[in-house]
Amino acid sequence: MSHRTMKTVNLITAIVDIILIFVAFGLAYEIRYRFQWFRDIDPAFYTTFQPYIPLAILLAGLILVAFLLEGVYRPSRSRTFGDEIYAVINGTTTGFVVMVFIVFFWRPLVYSRLIFVYATALIIVLLILARVIRRMLLGYLRSRGIGVDRVLIVGSGSVGLSVIRNLVARPELGYKVVGVLDDDPERGSKDIGRIPALGSIENFAEVLQQQQADEVIIAIPWRFRTKILDLVSQSTRAGVRPRVVPDLFQMSLSSVQLQDVAGIPMMSPSEAQLGSGARASKRLIDMIGSGIGLIILSPILLIIGTIIRLDSPGSPIFRQPRIGRNGKGFEVYKFRTMVQDADQKKDAIRHLNEADGPLFKIKDDPRVTRAGSFLRRSSLDELPQLWNVLRGDMSLVGPRPALPEEVEGYADWHRTRLATAPGITGLWQISGRSDIPFDEMVLLDIYYIENWSPLLDLSIMFRTIPKVLAGSGAY
C-alpha cells in the first residue's frame, strides 16, 4: 500500500471518526433524556437536542485536534492496535476534559453533565470498534494481495534476516518480500523459505525492474557505505522508496532502544525479552494453563486413547526424543497417529519427503492410521503435551519441538530458536504449520523469542483456535 494510499485511508478514517462522534452524541442524548438510565431527569430541565449540536461540533473539533497531536492520522505501519486504543482513549478524554472546562465556565446550568460522560464512553467504544473493522478489512485485502507493498531486501546477513522475520511474522503490515540480493555466493543463491535468492547485488537495477518492487530495504554493513549510497541513488531514480537499516553492533532490531537525550538520538541495547522475570511469569502461566487443561480434558483424553487402541495395536501414547530449551533433550508425549513400527519404516519412504531443510514431512504418509489421520487434522494428537508443559519440558506457546536429527542439520542461525522452551502452538502454527518452509518457520520462532510478551502468547492461543478448526496445514 503506497504512502499516498495510506494517507487516503487515514483521511477516510478521520471522516468516519467525525460521523461516529456525532452518532455517539446523539445516542448519549437519547440515553439521558429519553431512556433516563441511572438517573431520572426533572421535566423542567428537559431540552431538545438542538442546544447540544454546537457542543457536538466543539467536541468533534477538540478530539480531532487531540488525535492530530497524537499522530493518529499520520501514515504508519508500525502502530500497533494497542497504540491505536491508547490514542483513542487519550485523545477522547482530553477533548472531553477541555470541553467540560469550557462549557461549565460558560453556561453551567443549561447542560446535563451525564450526557457528556455518556458521549465520551460511546465515542471511545465506537471509534475502537471502527478501528477493529478497519484492521479486519485491511487484513482481508492484504491476504489477497490487495494493497500489499512489494519489498526487495538487499543483504541476507544477521540484519537482513532480522528484517525478513519481522516482515514475515507481521503480515498485517502489508509487505511482501519478493526476494533477497547478497554478494555472498552461498547466501545469494540459497532461498530463505519461500523468499527467493536473486543473486548478487550487482544485479540490483535489473532485479528492481523485474520484481516491480515498491520499496527497497538495504541491510548491508555500513562499512559498505559507498555501495549503500549508490543503491539509494538507483532506487530513487527508479521511483522506488529506499530504506536503510542501521547495523550498529549487528544487534537484533528488537534488541535496540532509541532514546532522545537533549535532542541527540542515541541507540542502546535493550534487555533480553525472555529474561529471568519473563521466564518466571511464562512458567507460571504454563503451569496454571496445563493443569486446568489436563483436569478439564481428562474424559476426552481417555476416549481418544480408547479409540486409538481399538483402531490399531500398540500403546495409545507415543513417546519421542525432542530437543528443548538450550539444546536439552526430553521425551515428548503425543497420541499415536501411526502404526506401531513407524520409525523402522521411515528410511523406506524417505524419498517421499515433501519438507525442506532438516524436516521430514509427507502429506499422505502411508504410516498414518485411520484414527491418526483425524487426530492430526484436528490437532488432538497434541493434547498429551500438556503433561510436558506441566513438567516444564515445554510451554503452551513457543517454537515447534525439534527432533535430534533435525538439530544436527541446523545452520548456526537456526539454533537461535532453541533459546526458549518449545510450545504446543506458536507463530509457526497460526501461519500455516506444515505448509511453511523450514527457514520461514525459524524466522517466525526467532521473532517470537525477540518479541515475547504475555499479550503475544494470548493472541497466538486465540488465533490457534480457528486454525485448528479449519485443519489448515495439518498433516
Image (tube, helix red, strand yellow):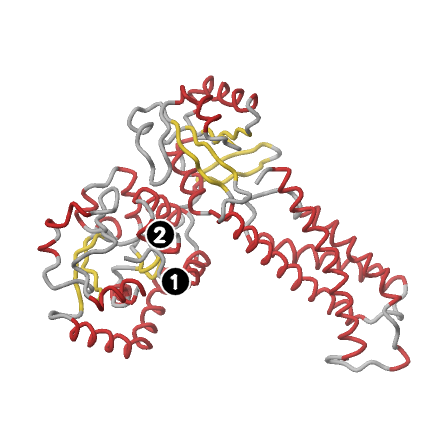
Of 286 and 316, nearer the camera is 316
Q: Name the amino acid type tagged 1.
A: Ala
Gap in angstroms between the C-alphas marked 2 and 1: 15 Å
Q: Residue at x 24, y 64 (%)?
A: 373
Q: In the picture, which quadrant includes the N terminus?
A: top right
Front one among 156 and 44: 156
Residue 307: image x %, image y %?
A: 21, 75
Side of 324 relative to 103 (left or right): left
* The one of 199 and 226 positioned closer to us in this rendering: 199
Task: Say which residue label 2 marks.
Answer: 428
Q: Is residue 409 something one can see in this rendering?
A: yes
- Residue visible at 70% across and 55% down? 16
Q: Position of residue 61 (x, y in %)?
A: 79, 53
Mark 1 Cα within 10 Å, few/some/many (few <14, many 20+)? few
Position in image of residue 97 (x %, y %): 76, 60
The residue labelled by disc 1 is 470
